[in-house]
Image: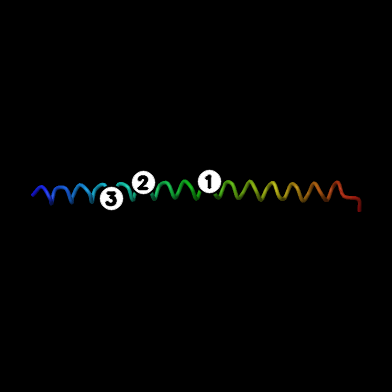
């Protein structure tokens, strides 16, 4: 009986950890998307700035 109880506890811990891992991945994906957006905006600004400051 104790073995079965321990296995149930381990299963619960696994599912909790899995849920936490999924949340971490979702947060990481959001941060990556935010960083990518900022990088794209910075690249667009740099390109626009080079066009303005370059003699035609």
Q: Residues within 10 Å of mark 3 (few under 14, many from 20)?
A: few
Residue at 91 percent across and 50 percent down: it is: 55
Disc 1 secondary structure class:
helix
The residue positioned farthest toward the bottom in the image shown: 56
Q: Earlier in the sequence, mark 1 or mark 2?
A: 2
Say which of 1 and 18 sits in front: 1
Q: Residues within 10 Å of mark 1 (few under 14, many from 20)?
A: few
Residue assigned mark 2: 20
- Distance from disc 3 to disc 1, alpha carbons, whole Å, reads 26 Å
Residue assigned mark 1: 31
Q: Earlier in the sequence, mark 3 or mark 1?
A: 3
Q: Position of residue 2 (x, y in %)?
A: 10, 47
Q: Position of residue 12 (x, y in %)?
A: 24, 48
Residue at 18 percent across and 50 percent down: it is: 8
Check whether the beta carbons of the residues at disc 3 and disc 1 lie within 8 A of each other: no
Residue at 56 percent across and 50 percent down: it is: 33
The residue positioned farthest toward the right in the image shown: 56
- Distance from disc 2 to disc 3, alpha carbons, whole Å, reads 10 Å
Q: Earlier in the sequence, mark 2 or mark 3?
A: 3
* Left or right relative to 47: residue 26: left
Q: Which mark is residue 14?
A: 3
Count of numbered circles on the image: 3
Q: Nearer the viewer, mark 3 or mark 1?
A: 3
Disc 2 secondary structure class:
helix
């Amino acid at each position: 009986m104790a073995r079965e109880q321990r296995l149930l506890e381990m299963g619960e811990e696994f599912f909790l950890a899995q849920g936490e891992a999924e949340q971490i991945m979702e947060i990481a994906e959001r941060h990556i998307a935010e960083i990518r957006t900022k990088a794209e905006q910075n690249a667009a600004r740099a390109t626009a700035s080079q066009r303005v400051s370059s003699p035609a």
